[in-house]
Image: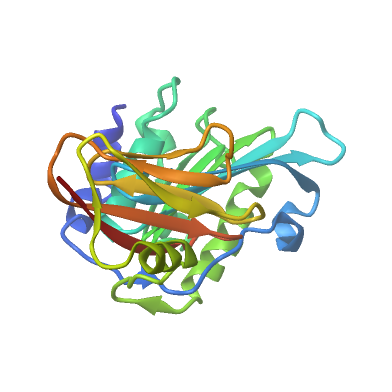
Amino acid sequence: MPVKQFLERLGYDELLKQERPLLGENYIFDATKIAAAKEFKAVHENVFLEESSIALVRQAHLQHGSKAHSSLHVTLTLCWNGFQDALAALARFAGSFERGVSAESVVSTVRTYEIGDFGVAWAWSGKGDPDVLALVRNNVLLGIRSHDAAEVTVSLAKEVDRALRNRRTTDAYSDTSHNLFVELKKREGGTLKVPSAGKLSLGTLPEGESKFFFLASSGSVNREADKPQSWYYRAGTDKGPQVIRLYWVDAGILPKRDGLIVEVY
């Protein structure tokens, strides 16, 4: 059954007309503190920023302590621009599998398990505990893929959803000053200017737990080849004011953001 059809059957299109508040308090996924995952250990983690929808994605691969064939892949995606982007991320997640899923296998997480603002789940066999579960709570997507570990899928989802539901929310995100841009403005003084295709040194970011991501309205932000902790902006061919955004996150899924305007001439 095409993903679009079972999403529509579960009320996806109606929810696209609605809004939800934004997660206002960081959530840290820690498998050691989740009862449902007590037999599992985190063996790999990946964090990246999706540019098209501005979403912070954190993926965790959990391996069972004594069953090498049992594992869980957990994805948490915070969509900066809100609930509708999270729903779109859920649709992409549900449609990312090579195997097809039968209509009878797909259930609503809201109606069946009472979790999420919207969600889907299914077992590949068509019966029993779900192998795949995806739900949206406010502007956060939780996606779970279990391999020979379907018995913990729902309980894991319930614990994460409860934590997300109990966190403070906000109506909008505001920018936070980062020392990189503060020091750059002090150093350069006045309006930051760079010629078309020119280079502007931004400064150095420390090594550590923090993850840093840059987005530029034109041009690109890159590392120095001989100093990977140092960053620079390479202007594009578009002239006029250009915006550089810096997103950063420590543990958790709620990033902070700062912005910088550079005049390209």
Above/below status of 181 relative to 43: below
Q: Nearer the viewer, residue 210 or 69?
A: 210
Residue 136, picture quadrant: bottom left
Which residue is situated farthest in the top direction here? Answer: 98
Pinpoint residue 55: horizontal percent, then vertical percent: 38, 50
Using residue 71 as the reference point, say whether residue 80 is left or right of it. Answer: left
Pinpoint residue 198: horizontal percent, then vertical percent: 28, 38
Q: Residue at x 40, y 22 (%)?
A: 100
Which residue is situated farthest in the right direction here? Answer: 66
Above/below status of 247 relative to 200: below
Q: Nearer the viewer, residue 205 or 255?
A: 205
Q: Residue at x 74, y 34 (%)?
A: 70
Pinpoint residue 94: horizontal percent, then vertical percent: 39, 36
Pinpoint residue 249: horizontal percent, then vertical percent: 52, 59
Using residue 206 as the reference point, say whether residue 9 is left or right of it. Answer: left
Query: Is residue 97 visible from the viewing direction of this image?
Result: yes
Query: Is residue 108 visible from the viewing direction of this image?
Result: no
Using residue 20 as the reference point, say whether residue 36 is left or right of it. Answer: right
Q: Residue at x 36, y 66 (%)?
A: 185
Above/below status of 166 relative to 69: below
